[in-house]
Amino acid sequence: MTLSPDIDALLDLAACPADRLWRYPICRVMVRPATRTFLTPNHVTALHTLLAVLAGAAIATSTPRTLFAAGLLFEVRAILDCFDGALARAKGMCSPAGRAVDQLGDAVGFVSFMAGGFVCLSRAHGSCAAAALVLATTLVAASCTAAWDLFRRRLTSLVTRGYDATGDERRELLRASTARPTAALQMSRLVLEFQVHVLDGRLSPPSDEGSDSRTDGPERAVTPLGRAVQRAAERNDPGLRGLLLRVGLVGGDNLLLLLSASLLVGRFVEAFPLAIVVGAAMLTHTVASMNRYLQEVARAEI
């Protein structure tokens, strides 16, 4: 099946709005000269992890100037977080290990941000309230990020390949983490287990059940669900567009953007309860929307 020439623009809707609107455009300018240097994606990952740690330390000092600086640092970190993936694709260096290192860097950066937030919140509300706010924000943001990652990969593979490739990716990661039990791969495997047992089990439509047991590789047959989603993409189905937009909004990066923006406007302490409510609402809505849409298109195909 020939896909629409606008398929890339359609799938870009599943990116975080900030990534789509300014971070990736900046990365596209940076990536061409960077491909001619010794710079690797892991170098960029190490740099954006360091910036996140510095931002966390700045938040912990809790002065107006350092909070503002932390907001700027964390946005630069977010741009570099997009850049390491763009550089990996440009240099042909994509791999499960590289993805795991990036996830580990993101985790270290997030923990640094939350640790600084805990110190700042403790000064305003006390350590018990601060711990509760930070823990709730962490759980919501991590769940949102795991959901975004799973749903984006699922929809992308359904549209571009005609089947749900997340099962193949799962087996590849399990093989890599068994062969090389590094901390990065083990953390990536932990995220995968959450996706499979908490999110995936509730979302896998009946039409694609058993796909994990099929043969790997490019000869995989198009499934009924994949055919239905491809047709929806070809006609630029508003339902699919809306679903992709909701997937883009559910990512934990949107909550971090909210918190980073609050650093710039001096409302960091007040932003935590808002981030928790917004994240939980978006996660619940996106899970329900994903399940409902895939079930509807599968039934329409039958």
Image (cartoon, grey):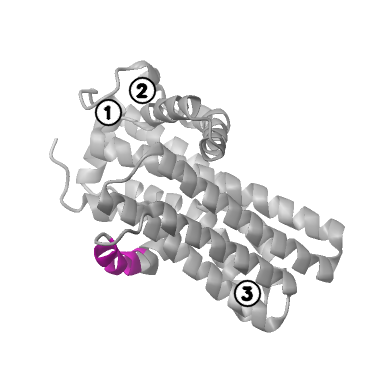
Distance, label 3 to label 2, CA atoms, is: 46 Å
Secondary element at tag 1: helix
Q: Are marks 1 and 3 in contact (CB under 8 Å)?
A: no
- Sequence-wise, the earlier of marks 1 and 3 is 3
For badge 2, the amino acid type reads: Ser
Residue 263 located left or right of residue 227 = right
Observer-side mark, 1 or 3, equals 3
Tell me: residue 271, above or below residue 206.
below
Tell me: residue 183, above or below residue 85.
above
Q: Where's residue 231, x and y in %?
A: 22, 38
Q: Which mark is residue 207?
A: 2
Residue 253 colored magenta? no
For badge 1, the amino acid type reads: Glu
Name the residue at 15% across, 51% down.
5
Q: Which residue is mark 1?
A: 301
Q: Where's residue 167, x and y in %?
A: 40, 27
Q: Which residues are magenta?
A: 24-34
Q: Residues within 10 Å of mark 2 (few under 14, many from 20)?
A: some
Residue 33 colored magenta? yes
Q: Are marks 1 and 2 in contact (CB under 8 Å)?
A: yes
Observer-side mark, 3 or 2, equals 3
Q: Residue furthest bottom?
A: 65
**Looking at the image, how many numbered discs can be counted on the residues?**
3
Name the residue at 35% across, 63% down.
24
Observer-side mark, 1 or 2, equals 2
Q: Residues within 10 Å of mark 1 (few under 14, many from 20)?
A: some
Question: 136 or 217: nearer the eye?
Answer: 217
